[in-house]
Image (tube, rainbow, N blue to C red):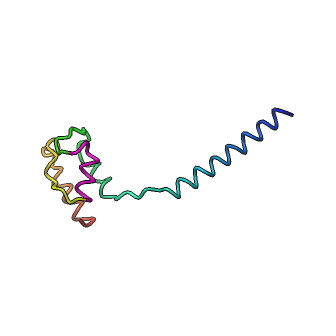
């Protein structure tokens, strides 16, 4: 009988914590600009810091939110990153 009560209590606690986490996830959801995600995917992803930002995601945020120049990614120049970033900004608005 003790095992049954223990299993029931653990099940109820698990359900309660799961509902709390689901509610918290919806309540504190952080909206991300889709342009930042698209630009981050295009950048090389080596996080070299040559652009002056700590990583590719930081540089993508600066491009979208601060209007920073799109030609600072030195490793991406060979692969035509600038043209792709310009295309994304033109397509989704700047």
Percent from the top left, x then y, of residue 87?
A: 20, 60
> Which quarter of the picture shows residue 4?
top right
Quarter of the picture holding the C terminus: bottom left
Residue in the picture at 70% in, 43% down: 13
Quarter of the picture holding the N terminus: top right
Q: Is residue 77 above or below residue 85?
A: above
Residue in the picture at 63% in, 51% down: 19
Mostly what secondary structure, the magenta segment? helix
Q: Foreground: 62 or 87?
A: 62
Residue sitting farthest toward the right? 1
Residue in the picture at 55% in, 53% down: 24
Looking at the rendered structure, the number of numbered marks drawn on it comes to 0
Was residue 57 drawn as part of the magenta stretch in this picture?
A: yes
Was residue 83 drawn as part of the magenta stretch in this picture?
A: no
Percent from the top left, x then y, of residue 75?
A: 16, 41
Q: Foreground: 4 or 43?
A: 4
Which contiguous range is marked in magenta?
53-65
Percent from the top left, x then y, of residue 42?
A: 25, 49
Determine whether, in the image, residue 39 is placed left or right of residue 15.
left
> Which quarter of the picture shows residue 50?
top left
Q: Is residue 85 above or below residue 2?
A: below
Percent from the top left, x then y, of residue 90?
A: 21, 65
Determine whether, in the image, residue 34 is placed left or right of residue 69.
right
């Amino acid at each position: 009988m003790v095992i049954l009560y223990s299993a029931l209590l653990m099940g109820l606690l698990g359900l309660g914590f799961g509902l709390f986490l689901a509610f918290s996830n919806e309540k504190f959801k952080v909206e991300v600009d889709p342009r930042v995600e698209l630009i981050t995917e295009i950048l090389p992803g080596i996080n070299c810091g040559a652009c002056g930002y700590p990583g590719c995601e930081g540089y993508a945020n600066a491009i979208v939110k601060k209007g920073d120049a799109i030609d600072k990614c030195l490793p991406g120049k060979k692969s035509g990153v600038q043209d792709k970033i310009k295309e994304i900004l033109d397509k989704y608005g700047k």
